[in-house]
Amino acid sequence: MKRALVFQHMDHDTVGRFADFFAEDGLVPQAVRLWEGQPIPSLRDFDFLFVLGGAQDVWETDKYPWLAAEKEAIREWVTVHAKPYVGVCLGHQLLADALGGKVGMARESEVGVHKISINGDGARHPLFDGLAGEQTVMQWHHAEVQEAPEGADVLASSQLTAIQAMAICDHAIGLQFHAEFTPQSVASWESLPGYVASLEAALGPGAYRRVAEQAYPILPAMGLLSRRIYQNLRRQSGLRRVA
């Protein structure tokens, strides 16, 4: 049985639609609740690493000491083991920071439904094979990757964020947007007061309903985008379905 290791940074956060992809490929996910102090297990026992988003910032190692060990684990995974990696939002930023890139506060936050543009390098990169032009995605971030690590390929940008997606060789990808979100993700926020409050802090009163109405119509197409990225990563990294 193949296993996917998941670094989790806050309660109620999951790999979302990637759980379907994992199930189809015989990958069983195991989440580590880092903010609760759960230790990172031996990386050698896993075949895939998925790093979720979170309210923390990569530079807050004094406030969240476990971030240092997480960044070291990401560095080891990507540079030593060279196995499949997906990082979304904070997971994208942690990948950049762990490999020597620069992360800082964004000039302007992106929260809700936004467009990204796949650049020429992205359209030619194996991890974005079959993708081009403008894509509509869901965002929820206040920090951003300001400088990609040496050797990384920048694949996409938005009006506000220059590095919306980046690849490390053919086995690791960071996505600033939330490729994992599903209709169930959005529906769950309505029963989580903290999530609703965060949306309203960013977008004003009634933000949840506005975001939900904008998000539901675009989620099927975003799901196809996420599936294509996953399939490309699976093919390029050599990950194979368990028989």
Image: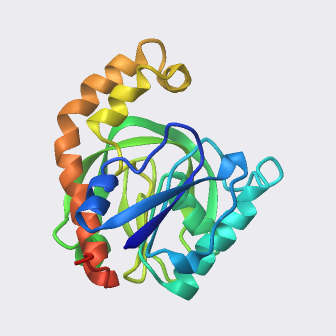
Of 51 and 133, nearer the camera is 51
Q: How is the image coloured?
A: rainbow
Q: Residue at x 74, y 57 (%)?
A: 66
Residue 91 appears in the figure: yes
Q: Position of residue 180 (x, y in %)?
A: 36, 49
Taking 5 as reference, is 9 left or right? right
Q: Residue at x 27, y 54 (%)?
A: 20
In which quadrant of the rendered view does residue 234 lie? bottom left
From the viewer's perspective, is residue 24 above or below residue 237? above
Taking 171 as reference, is 228 left or right? left
In the displayed orientation, state which residue is furthest to the right.
62
In which quadrant of the rendered view does residue 147 lie? bottom right
Q: Position of residue 194 (x, y in %)?
A: 56, 24
Q: Position of residue 112 (x, y in %)?
A: 38, 34
Q: Residue at x 37, y 51 (%)?
A: 158
Viewport quadrant of the N terminus: bottom left
Q: Residue at x 30, y 45 (%)?
A: 137
Q: Position of residue 187 (x, y in %)?
A: 33, 27
Viewport quadrant of the C terminus: bottom left
Residue 125 appears in the figure: no
